[in-house]
Every structure is written in structure tokens, then in C-alpha cells.
Amino acid sequence: MKKILLISFLIISFITISTIASRTFFITNSKLNSISNKYGTSAKTRVEL
């Protein structure tokens, strides 16, 4: 029983972390342009790397 609980907890944690990471690191051109307008071209260059 503990094994099943642990495995399900690990799977849920992995799915949550991967969902957050995909939303965080998926940057569109419109997001890049807004970063450039707000913080300057040097910030845009750092984000593109």
C-alpha cells in the first residue's frame, strides 16, 4: 500500500513539475518583444540564450 502511494505521489509530482516547466520555458515572439520593450535589448538577448 505504501509503495502504491509513493509511486502515485512521484508521478503526480513529475507531471506537475513538467507542466510548470513547459509553461515557464515556452517563450513566443510576442513575449520576447514585450521583454525587449520593458527591459531593453540586452535582456531579450539573455532570454534568447
Image: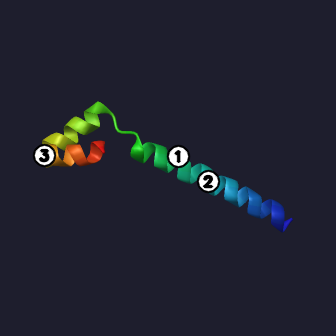
Quadrant placement of the N terminus:
bottom right
The numbered dot on residue 14 is 2
Which residue position holds label 3? 40
Residue at 25 percent of width and 38 percent of height: 32
Q: Residue at x 17, y 41 (%)?
A: 36
Report the residue marked by disc 1: 19
Crowd rating for badge 2 (residues with CA inside 10 Å; few <14, some 14–19, many 20+): few
Q: Residue at x 40, y 45 (%)?
A: 25
Give coordinates of residue 35: x percent, y percent.
21, 43
Residue type, label 2:
Phe
Q: Are marks 3 and 2 in contact (CB under 8 Å)?
A: no
Q: Which mark is residue 34?
A: none
Secondary structure beneath dot 2 equals: helix
Question: Residue type at mark 3?
Answer: Gly
Q: Position of residue 19 (x, y in %)?
A: 53, 46
| Helix, strand or loop for disc 3 | loop
Q: Residues within 10 Å of mark 1 (few under 14, many from 20)?
A: few
The image's colouring method is rainbow
How far separated are the C-alphas under marks 1 and 2?
9 Å
Residue 41 placement (x, y as % from top left): 14, 43
